[in-house]
């Protein structure tokens, strides 16, 4: 009788262990089911994350260029002995071809007659004799690349580049770069002295935005500084950056 009781105790203990093991395996191996509402919310969150990532990529196009261009010389391959604006533009746009206006400028220069403005949604204004070129997207808001160059007394050229993006839902982005082109080395090297002069004039702390216009005619840069006055309006102040054969001198335009 005692033996039967002992066997019964062992059977009960064994059954308890089996139940515990079974419950433990069930918790570890079973995936919690989501309701239809939870699944929809999860999908929406994933889509939002993807959209945010794509938006960030678009909004940082100019930022990615600015990260490297102050320390990145660019080699030029002129077709003639004297480099022209197309040579400088090709060199710069090949270096930074992920930016849409640059990519379209390259397409235009490859074959201007076959370039389709409507298909590319981008207009290119090329004036080789004036040393000027601009590629701008045919959108409601600004997105463009503008370039020109000046001849220097030492036989070098100063190459100017201006990029701008402006959309309704984000703050405008304006950036510029200047290169000294040495015909002996066929290299455009960032000109930090010129950059400092223009940055001091354009990026003043008491203004909220600026725009510059590189010259297609003449030699001076037009600079407009904007002060936000509220209610979607701003107050402009106008300057000329006068070319002095080697650098620029900011001059306030009287009466503005």
Image (cartoon, rainbow, N blue to C red):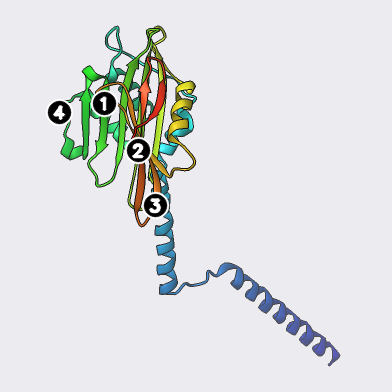
Residues under numbered marks 2 and 4 in contact, where contact means CB atoms less than 8 Å apart: no
Q: Which residue is mark 1?
A: 133
Tell me what residue is drawn at x 42 percent, y 42 percent. 60
Relative depth, front residue between 6 and 223: 223
Q: Which residue is mark 2?
A: 164
Specify the quadrant of the image occupied by residue 246: top left
Q: Which residue is mark 3?
A: 229
Q: Position of residue 131 (x, y in %)?
A: 27, 19
Q: How much space separates mark 3 and mark 4, taking CA atoms?
A: 46 Å
| Sequence-earlier tag: 1 or 4 | 4
Relative depth, front residue between 65 and 44: 65
Helix, strand or loop at disc 3? strand
| Sequence-earlier tag: 3 or 1 | 1
Q: How much space separates mark 2 and mark 1, taking CA atoms?
A: 15 Å
Helix, strand or loop at disc 2? strand
20 w.r.t. 96: above or below: below
Number of the label disc, if any, that sits on residue 114: 4
Residue 100 falls left or right of residue 195: left
């Amino acid at each position: 009788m005692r033996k039967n009781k002992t066997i019964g105790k062992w059977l009960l203990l064994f059954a308890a262990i089996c139940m515990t093991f079974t419950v433990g395996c069930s918790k570890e191996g079973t995936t919690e089911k989501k309701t239809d509402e939870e699944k929809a919310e999860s999908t929406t969150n994933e889509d939002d994350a993807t959209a945010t990532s794509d938006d960030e990529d678009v909004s940082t196009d100019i930022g990615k260029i600015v990260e490297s261009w102050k320390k990145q010389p660019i080699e030029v391959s002129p077709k003639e002995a004297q480099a022209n604006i197309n040579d400088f533009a090709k060199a710069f746009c090949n270096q930074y071809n992920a930016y849409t206006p640059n990519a379209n400028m390259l397409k235009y220069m490859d074959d201007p007659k076959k370039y389709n403005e409507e298909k590319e949604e981008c207009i290119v204004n090329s004036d080789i004799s004036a040393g000027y070129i601009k590629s701008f997207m045919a959108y409601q808001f600004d997105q463009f690349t503008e370039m020109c160059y000046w001849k220097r007394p030492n036989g070098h050229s100063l190459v100017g580049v201006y990029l701008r993006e402006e959309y309704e839902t984000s703050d405008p982005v304006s950036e510029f770069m200047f290169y000294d082109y040495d015909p002996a080395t066929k290299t455009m090297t960032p000109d930090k002295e010129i950059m400092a002069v223009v940055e001091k004039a354009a990026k003043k702390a008491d203004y909220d935005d600026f725009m510059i216009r590189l010259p297609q005619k003449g030699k001076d840069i037009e600079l407009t500084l904007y002060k936000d006055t509220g209610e979607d309006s701003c107050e402009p102040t106008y300057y000329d950056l006068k070319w002095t054969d080697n650098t620029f001198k900011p001059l306030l335009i009287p009466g503005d």
